[in-house]
Amino acid sequence: MVNPCSLCDANCCKSYLITATAFDVLRVVERTGRPASDFAMLHQARILAFDPDSTLDMEDESWIYLLGFISHPCVFLEKNRCQIHECSPMACRRFPFMLDGLLNTRFCPLSSQLVFRLKGASITAEELKHENEAHKRIVKEWNAKPGKLKDCLSFLLKRAGEMRDSADSGLPQLAEKKKTGGKKR
Ligand code: SF4
Ligand code: SF4
């Protein structure tokens, strides 16, 4: 079946500032060899529509932050193609399907929407929710003992690696699936 995103000029990648989980960032680091600071940063949550459970407190900072990619359009978009399709964030893999299974039709051309309806989502809502919840557990750990902004990203990645590698996390299996699945723009 035709790739629905090949019928589009990556409208969504140009339109959203991509928020990511610590697991998303870790996978990109491992796959590309690029340091996280090259492509990820903590954004002030007040400029984004956000889930309050995903925000990170900072010691002595008056704002709370969300993890995301650095630029908008997305830093990994080149010539309307995603350069990290094998390890793109879970939210990108799920899009344009929302967690409730409905299609977000705001950016997809009609032809792409029709193909998505036939093809379905690349990952399930449960997979996305599972990883989001794991990310929120890490955020909670940080918020229980918040530190400096400069230390936060490394804390998130360290804990994501530890959690993913722990026997009962369920995350290694999820990470394996993502090596072959997902959207190829
Ligand atoms: S990571 Fe890839 S799919 Fe996601 S917004 Fe960036 S270019 Fe698009
Ligand atoms: S998900 Fe929709 S808007 Fe995004 S690249 Fe695919 S067709 Fe275009």
Image (tube, rainbow, N blue to C red):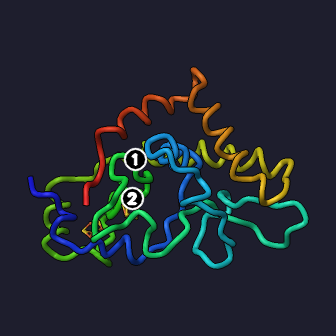
Q: 86 or 15: which is nearer to us?
A: 86
Q: How far apart are the two marked residues, 1 and 2, measured between alpha carbons?
A: 10 Å
69, above or below 71, in the image? above
14, above or below 119, in the image? below
Say how many tags the image has.
2
Q: Residue at x 49, y 43 (%)?
A: 27
Q: Residue at x 48, y 29 (%)?
A: 172
* Mark 2 Cβ and ligand 1 under 8 Å apart: yes
Q: Comparing marks 1 and 2, which lies closer to the viewer?
A: 1
Q: Is residue 30 left or right of residue 142?
A: left
* Mark 1 Cβ and ligand 1 under 8 Å apart: no
The amino acid marked with disc number 1 is Cys
Which mark is drawn over residue 92?
2
Badge 1 is on which residue? Answer: 87
Quadrant assignment, res 8: bottom left
| Element marked by disc 2 | helix
Q: Is residue 123 left or right of residue 54?
A: left
